Image (cartoon, rainbow, N blue to C red):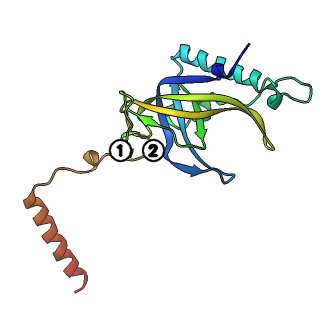
Amino acid sequence: MMNMNDTKLTLKNVRLSYANIWEPKETPNGDLKYGASLIIPKTDKKQIAEIKRAIEAAKNIGKSKVVNKNGKIPPNLKVPLRDGDTDRFDDDAYEGCYFINANSNTAPKIVDRKIKPILDRSAVYSGCYANVSVTFYAYKTDAGSGIAAGLGNIQKVKDGEPLGGASNPEDDFEVLDDDEFETEFANTDDEDEDMFE
């Protein structure tokens, strides 16, 4: 017999994207939720299989919410495991991967490799890798029913290339010595005077 423990997983070494984990973001229906997209390589077959088993457990435990009028779970029921090559085909970060969008009404606890709280918000970001606890559950709304993923806690594993278009200062600028700064500042003053002549 399945129980709630069958629907909870700790996903290992997934890449965070759209990581609204420090501050909640307003959803289309006006709710405030924390969330992240969790990117999993398709080559990680063992973990993908565990996710599919947990989703099936959530279907059975929440059967009353997802059955159709004939009392059957529809084969095309909406599930949180999605194919990055089709659903995010225009984003290189999702190429060759599956992904899960996980959300929560409460802030996740965010820790480092030694399970110490991370206080520096810039340390955990879209693009880094993490272990993330998720719980799959059935839902039913006016818009339909399906299986969703609840966001649990986050353990940062390692850094990765930042996603979302943000660049590093080291990529944008060169180190300037004091003389260069004074020369550039002086030239700027001259240009400003020219503008008002």
Determine crowd level at label 1: few under 14, some 14-19, many 20+ residues with C-alpha closer than 10 A. Answer: few
Q: Which residue is mark 2?
A: 164
Q: Is residue 96 visible?
A: no
Q: Which residue sits at x=87%, y=29%?
A: 68
Amino acid of disc 1: Asp
Judging depth in this view, the residue of 22 and 13 nearest the camera is 22
Q: Residue 67's spot in the image, x, y percent?
A: 84, 27
Q: Which residue sits at x=52%, y=25%?
A: 40
Q: Which residue is mark 1?
A: 120
Which type of secondary structure does the marked residue at label 2 adopt? loop
Q: Which residue sits at x=42%, y=40%?
A: 125
Judging depth in this view, the residue of 136 and 1 nearest the camera is 1
Q: Is residue 146 visible?
A: yes
- Which quadrant of the figure has residue 8? top right
Q: Residue 157's spot in the image, x, y percent?
A: 39, 28
Residue 122 lies, with reference to residue 62, above or below; the image says below
Q: Residue 84's spot in the image, x, y percent?
A: 57, 30
**The N terminus lies in which quarter of the figure?**
top right
Locate residue 162 relative to residue 142 in the image: left or right: left
- Farthest residue to the right: give it: 70
Labels 1 and 2: the sequence-earlier one: 1
Amino acid of disc 2: Gly
Locate residue 172 relative to residue 20 in the image: left or right: left
**The C terminus lies in which quarter of the figure?**
bottom left
